Image (cartoon, rainbow, N blue to C red):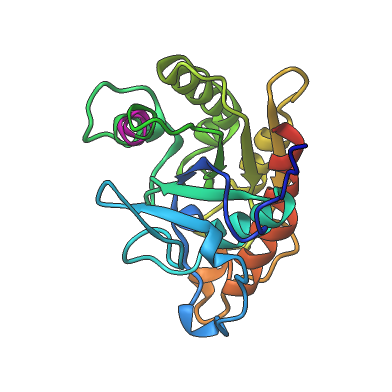
């Protein structure tokens, strides 16, 4: 008789890889000094891509940035998926517009760069299992036309990326945090309305909101960025459960 013994939960049997894309809040702008060191108890089951190599997961997940939602998401998802490790590939870029995420064959482009990193993972025998996307602050500062067209441009980006990757990966996107009421971002509510107007039926996609989360208060202009506490809640309590429902 063969007796099956389960491996300890701390030893991943397989790895799932998730892409992070968008602008500054996806990169991370929270302060690392606000981390206590106890936020990610499953850090041994998370990795991130740095210079085409896997390294132990840590914040920031984007070199040179601040705390984002990445590790909180990965740590929480690891807890929801026993014996699975979570890989992160963060291709976000601060200040980028949704137009900069449109299809491009250039590896120097945001689209091409992220696609190339994803394809490299596939060539190594890995999988791409989903994407978390947080962007829209730029359109809130640009024009009403750009703000109202966010949904169309985002859906085109997702459609093109899935087609080029050859995998219809699930996507969780974040609608903007509370309106910072800044003169520099007069179209904030218009972007949010565009994001929340997307009909998700049949899209293999989920929307979560960043509203109500802690934002940076060190400077009025920084109110567009989530603080460390807000990023931790976003990743663990909002993005991770939403992604799990799509897997």
Tell me which secondary structure the magenta stretch mostly adopts.
helix
Q: Name the image quarter holding residue 177.
A: bottom right
Q: Quadrant of the C terminus?
A: top right
| Depicted 158 relative to depicted 49: above or below | above
Q: Nearer the viewer, residue 5 or 190?
A: 5
Q: How many labels does the image show?
A: 0
Decide whether residue 119 is among the magenta residues: yes
Q: Give the range drawn in magenta.
A: 114-120
- Report x, y in % for residue 109: 27, 34
Residue at 37% from the left image edge and 22% from the top image edge: 103
- Report x, y in % for residue 66: 43, 69
Residue at 23% from the left image edge and 31% from the top image edge: 107
Decide whether residue 182 is among the magenta residues: no
Q: Name the image quarter holding residue 35.
A: bottom right
Q: Which of 168 and 2 is in front in this view?
A: 2
Q: Quadrant of the N terminus?
A: top right
Is residue 137 something one can see in this rendering?
Answer: no
- Report x, y in % for residue 15: 52, 43
| Depicted 201 relative to depicted 178: above or below | above
- Report x, y in % for residue 17: 50, 41
Residue at 57% from the left image edge and 51% from the top image edge: 12
Q: Which of 143 and 3 is in front in this view?
A: 3
Is residue 124 something one can see in this rendering?
Answer: yes
| Depicted 166 relative to depicted 187: above or below | above
Residue at 54% from the left image edge and 29% from the top image edge: 154
Q: Which of 185 and 5 is in front in this view?
A: 5
Q: In this view, does 236 lie to the left or right of 117?
A: right
């Amino acid at each position: 008789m063969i007796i099956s013994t389960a491996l300890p939960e701390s030893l991943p049997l397989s790895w799932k890889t998730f892409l992070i894309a968008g602008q500054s809040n996806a990169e991370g702008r929270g302060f690392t000094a606000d981390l206590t060191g106890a936020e990610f108890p499953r850090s041994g089951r998370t990795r991130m891509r740095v210079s085409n190599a896997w390294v132990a997961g840590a914040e920031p997940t984007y070199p040179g940035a601040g705390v984002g939602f990445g590790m909180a998401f990965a740590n929480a998802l690891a807890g929801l998926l026993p014996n699975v490790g979570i890989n992160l590939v963060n291709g976000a870029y601060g200040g980028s517009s949704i137009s900069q995420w449109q299809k491009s064959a250039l590896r120097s482009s945001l689209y091409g760069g992220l696609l190339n990193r994803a394809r490299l993972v596939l060539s190594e025998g890995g999988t791409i299992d989903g994407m978390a996307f947080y962007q829209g602050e730029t359109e809130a500062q640009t024009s009403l036309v750009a703000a109202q067209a966010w949904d169309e441009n985002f859906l085109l980006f997702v459609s093109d990326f899935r087609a080029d990757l050859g995998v219809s990966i699930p996507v969780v996107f974040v609608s903007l945090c509370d309106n910072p009421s800044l003169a520099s971002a007069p179209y904030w509510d218009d972007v949010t309305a565009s994001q929340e107007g997307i009909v998700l039926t049949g899209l293999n996609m989920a929307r979560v909101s960043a509203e109500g989360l802690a934002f940076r208060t060190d400077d009025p202009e920084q109110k567009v960025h989530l603080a460390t506490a807000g990023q931790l809640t976003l990743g663990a309590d909002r993005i991770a459960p939403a992604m799990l429902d799509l897997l």
